[in-house]
Image: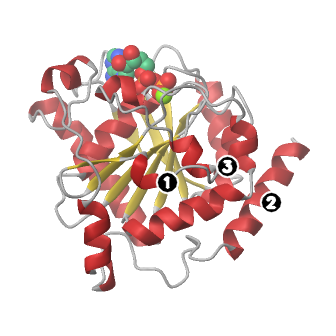
Amino acid sequence: MEKIQNAIAKARAERDTAPGSSVNVGRPSVGASTDAANSSQVLEAWDSLPELKVDNRRMEKNRIVSFSGGKAASSIDMMRTRILQQMRVNNWRRLAITSGTADCGKSTISLNLAFSLSQQSDFRTILMEMDLRRPSLAKTLGIKEGHNLAAVLNGSARFEDNALRYGKNLIISTNKGAWKNPAELLQGAQLPKALAEIEATYEPDMVIMDMPPMLVSEDVMAFLGQVDCVLLVAAAEATTIKQVDMCERELAAQTNVMGVVLNKCRYMEAEYGYGYYG
Ligand SMILES: Nc1ncnc2c1ncn2[C@@H]1O[C@H](COP(=O)(O)OP(=O)(O)O)[C@@H](O)[C@H]1O
Ligand SMILES: [Mg+2]
């Protein structure tokens, strides 16, 4: 535990001193794009990213329902609206999505939220795959480029070579395989700089970080100093109340807990099985 506390303290200190760090003070609020945010340099940076084309059948199969319309998409849109409200009010930008254990649906929810946000034309979102032990987004989306966000975060590759743009206002950056030393990377001094640089170039209104499960390694707790808030995903019939309670308390001690999403719930009115408890 002491190790985690030290790592968090270190990450916070580094984040507070990083140039262009995402500390809330003085930065434009979520969704309030400034003139500078629309500067030609930023637009050019977005335009020059290669485009991600999605295959609707693949999306459907992988439960990415946010473009399909209907009941399932509307429960995602409701979650999006509530998250947006909270982030705007608090002037938060970086949202981490985690769960206690694996397979609760973090990546599915991250993607659904990101695509749902992409429908807001005046809002820029970047989705970053931070589960470096078990990356899954490239496979889910059918990305074959062999991108490696981890290499960008450790300073050995360029973001523009490891990210794709969906439409005009969503960027997705994935990993082709597991990274050998995720703990070192997520707690390293280079990462805050890399994040700040990406934000300075693309000026996103929201950065969604698809995290690893928090009970499996120290990665998440050590990383929380880098984010403004966190969403906890629980899987009905797999995550126990005790686990949710413990995770929520541990997260709340380190950052702002946005809420708990109950996923994979067969008996909920919403066809897709999402419940959001903000
Ligand atoms: N609401 C849901 N109902 C049924 N299966 C789901 C649901 N959400 C996700 N899944 C499936 O569960 C598996 C794990 O989801 P994933 O998003 O990769 O979890 P995590 O990122 O938490 O490990 C995937 O096969 C995914 O398609
Ligand atoms: Mg995942």
Q: Is residue 41 above or below residue 161?
A: below
Which residue shows up at 58% across the image and 44% down it?
151
Q: Quadrant of the N terminus?
A: top right
Q: Give the residue number, with chain letter if any, for mark 1.
A: 158
**Crowding near pointer 2: few (<14 within 10 Å), some, many (20+)?**
some
Q: Which mark is first along the chain, 1 or 3?
A: 1
Q: Is label 3 within 8 A of ligand 2 (CB to nearest ligand atom)?
A: no
Name the residue that disc number 2 marks. Answer: 9
Q: Residue at x 49, y 58 (%)?
A: 94
Location of residue 180 (image quadrant): top right
* Secondary structure beneath label 1: loop
Whether residue 6 is visible here, answered yes or no, is: yes
Residue 77 percent across, percent down from the top left: 22, 45
Q: CA distance from mark 3 to mark 2?
A: 10 Å
Q: Quadrant of residue 145?
A: top left
Q: Amino acid under label 1?
A: Arg
Q: Amino acid at mark 3?
A: Phe
